Image (cartoon, helix red, strand yellow):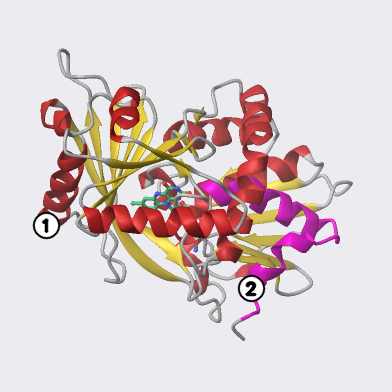
Amino acid sequence: MQNRNRPTVSVVGAGVIGLSVAWRAARAGWQVTVHDPAPARGASWVAGGMLAPLTEGWPGEGAALALGEASLLRWPEFAAELSSSAGVPSGLGTEGTLVVGLDSADAGELQVVAEWLAAHGRSVSELTRKQLHTREPALAQGIRHGLDVPGDLAVDNRALLAALQAGCVSAGVQMVSEAVTDLGMLDTDQVVLAAGIGSPGLRAALPVRPVKGEILRLRHRRGAPAAPGSTVRGVVHGRHVYLVPRADGLVLGATQYEVGEDREVTVGGIRDLVADAEAILPSIAEYGLSEASAGLRPMTPDNLPLLGRVDARTVVATGHGRNGLLLAPLTADAVLAELAGTPLPEIAVADPRRFE
Ligand SMILES: Cc1cc2nc3c(=O)[nH]c(=O)nc-3n(C[C@H](O)[C@H](O)[C@H](O)COP(=O)(O)OP(=O)(O)OC[C@H]3O[C@@H](n4cnc5c(N)ncnc54)[C@H](O)[C@@H]3O)c2cc1C
């Protein structure tokens, strides 16, 4: 039974984006219903959890850098508020990120990123071979080039999803375990479309496509060297790999393919991830392999999200591509601002109608 004294909103999709929006909206006084047949099991469940606008950065992607940094700034407060509202940890880690390159061409790639960031006023420090190995003794001996990026963080995505679900329950969000087939059927004042790769099925013009990513979860075994103290991103003969520490081991990712809605883990994907990660951190060979999974990133043509109002009743929050966890706090703030009728100027670049 809905209390008509409060404005009502339906959120379609219970990934990190839909849950963040729902939790924040309920705390802001909205009466919120979330619809999802498989809550918290989409791309958000599979992800690695990096909150890394600087080390994800690349020349030409200044708008993505600005959005990512605007969201990263919000992360500490978002995490603290969530933990206290949900009564469980948010999963946010504060250990920073190391970036390493294996051969001299890989080191050249690091240099390009460092110079581009410096040109944008973001400095990252280069580490000598000795500094690198003092910081992370388990790194492969041959690694000579590295960058220290203390501001790029990581979150345990599954702890985060559990906290968001608990936060939603405690804020009074109603969960409906069914797929939405037509936004017009939803009986609320406002609708937020946050269905990841399912979004174009509900609003055809949205240019969101699935980009497959495979990822491994490794369990630390007794006697094996400890996992690194911070996230380690590596460039290995031109291929990218990352190792994100977790309480019980490491997450190791991620492949990237344009193959439509294919969620099957391939032997080739596992082979490449393990080979590249082992070139960075040989001790992973002593870890247990606890999970291999694949997820579908909701990607847009310009790698920026689709974030904003598309009609008087509908706000879109999707297309977060490789950065949905990073962008969750900014997205929640942006959607709340749209619902209140005062859009955030900083998300103008993410206007969902920019491709029309
Ligand atoms: C391998 C991999 C690694 C990644 N690593 C990172 C990382 O390190 N850092 C980072 O920031 N991001 C990362 N990402 C990206 C991140 O996971 C996504 O950007 C983010 O999860 C998108 O969140 P979402 O809520 O939009 O989508 P999802 O988590 O996919 O949630 C969408 C939800 O909508 C529901 N849905 C779909 N259709 C309907 C419908 N018709 N009715 C109702 N519900 C519907 C689905 O069931 C699903 O639960 C990674 C992604 C992958 C695949």
Residue 224 image point, x, y percent? 16, 18
Q: Is residue 198 above or below residue 265?
A: below
Residue span colored magenta? 326-354
> Alpha carbon of mark 1 to alpha carbon of mark 2: how far?
36 Å
> What's the magenta bit mostly, secondary-structure-wise?
helix
Q: Based on the displayed image, in which of its 4 quarters is residue 100 positioned?
A: top left
Name the kind of residue labelled 2 in the image: Pro
Name the kind of residue labelled 1 in the image: Gly
Please state, as top left, top right, bottom left or bottom right, where the N terminus lies in the image. top right
**Mark 2 residue CB less than 8 A from any atom of ligand 1:** no
Residue 283 image point, x, y percent? 15, 28
Q: Secondary structure at mark 1?
A: helix
Q: Residues within 10 Å of mark 1 (few under 14, many from 20)?
A: few
- Picture mark count: 2
Residue at x-position 63% and y-position 48%: 71
Q: Is residue 307 above or below residue 152?
A: below
First in sequence, mark 1 or 2: give its number.
Answer: 1
Residue 268: which numbered mark, if any? 1
Please state, as top left, top right, bottom left or bottom right, where the C terminus lies in the image. bottom right
- Give yes or no for residue 331 being in the magenta stretch: yes
Q: Based on the displayed image, in which of its 4 quarters is residue 213 positioned?
A: bottom left
Residue in the foreground of this view, choosing between 96 and 350: 96
Residue 352: which numbered mark, if any? 2
Of badges 1 and 2, nearer the viewer stands 1
**Mark 1 residue CB less than 8 A from any atom of ligand 1:** no
Residue at x-position 35% and y-position 29%: 131
- Give yes or no for residue 152 being in the magenta stretch: no
Quadrant hosting ligand 1 = bottom left
